[in-house]
Structure formats: structure tokens, C-alpha cells
Image (tube, rainbow, N blue to C red):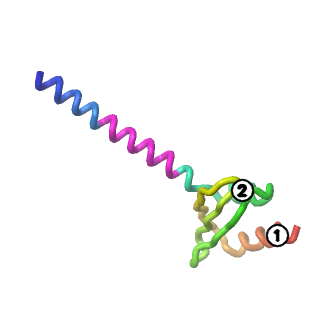
Amino acid sequence: MKSSIKKLAMWLIVAVIFLITVYALVNKQDTKMTYDELRVKIESAEVKSIVLSSDGTKAYVVLKGSTTEKEVLIPSLDSFMNNIDSHLKT
């Protein structure tokens, strides 16, 4: 009887760890966006707001129809600003 309880407890622990890992991965994907995805969203006018970090390496983006802020790593602030500027003019 004790061995079956130990096995059940072990499987419960494994299941909890699995669920926590899956939740963390899903939650992380909801708050991240690639730089290429951001450029596509800007070109298709799907971006509601963009806030740049103080060091210019990250942007925090909110898409139209959403309240979730997504983090984007910016490889080059100069090229990003040129890209944004050209879209703002059009």
C-alpha cells in the first residue's frame, strides 16, 4: 500500500511540474514578439503604441484590439527609427 501511495505522489509531482512548465512557456510567448513580426505589424498598421526602453534595446508594443504589452528586442535603434519614421510619413 505504501509503494502505491509513493508512486501516486511521484506522478502528481511530475504532473504539477509539467503543468507549471507548459504554463510558463505559453505565458512567455504571449508577451514576446520578434523584430520581424513587429516590422510586419507596423507595415500593416496593426500597432497601437510603442514605448522604447531607456537604453534603446527593447520596445514594448501594444497591438490594436489588444491590451497585452509585448516585448521586442531591437537590434539597431537607428534602423528601427528610420523604419518607423518612413511609416509615420505615409
Q: Which residues are magenta?
A: 14-28
User: What residue appears at the point 77 percent right and 69 percent down from the top-left corner?
Assistant: 84
* Residue 39 is inside the magenta segment: no
Amino acid identity at mark 2: Lys
User: What residue appears at the point 27 percent right and 37 percent down from the top-left corner?
Assistant: 13
**Residue 47 figure quarter:** bottom right
The answer to whether residue 83 is above or below residue 47 is: below
**Residue 8 figure quarter:** top left
| Residue that lies at the very extreme toward the right in this rendered image | 90
**Label 1 SS:** helix
- What residue is disc 2 on? 64
**Which label number is shown at residue 80?**
none
Residue 51, horizontal then vertical, whole percent: 64, 70
| Residue that lies at the very extreme toward the left in this rendered image | 2
Residue 26, horizontal then vertical, whole percent: 50, 45
Residue in the foreground of this view, choosing between 67 and 60:
67
Amino acid identity at mark 1: Leu
Q: Please identify the dominant SS of the magenta region.
A: helix
User: What residue appears at the point 77 percent right and 68 percent down from the top-left corner?
Assistant: 83
Q: Is residue 47 left or right of residue 88?
A: left
The quarter of the picture where the C terminus appears is: bottom right
Residue in the foreground of this view, choosing between 84 and 5:
5
| Residue that lies at the very extreme toward the top in this rendered image | 1
**Which label number is shown at residue 88?**
1
The answer to whether residue 7 is above or below residue 21 is: above
Q: Is residue 13 left or right of residue 68?
A: left
Q: Is residue 49 left or right of residue 71?
A: right
Which label's residue is closer to the chain start, 1 or 2? 2
Q: Is residue 53 left or right of residue 82?
A: left
**Label 2 SS:** loop
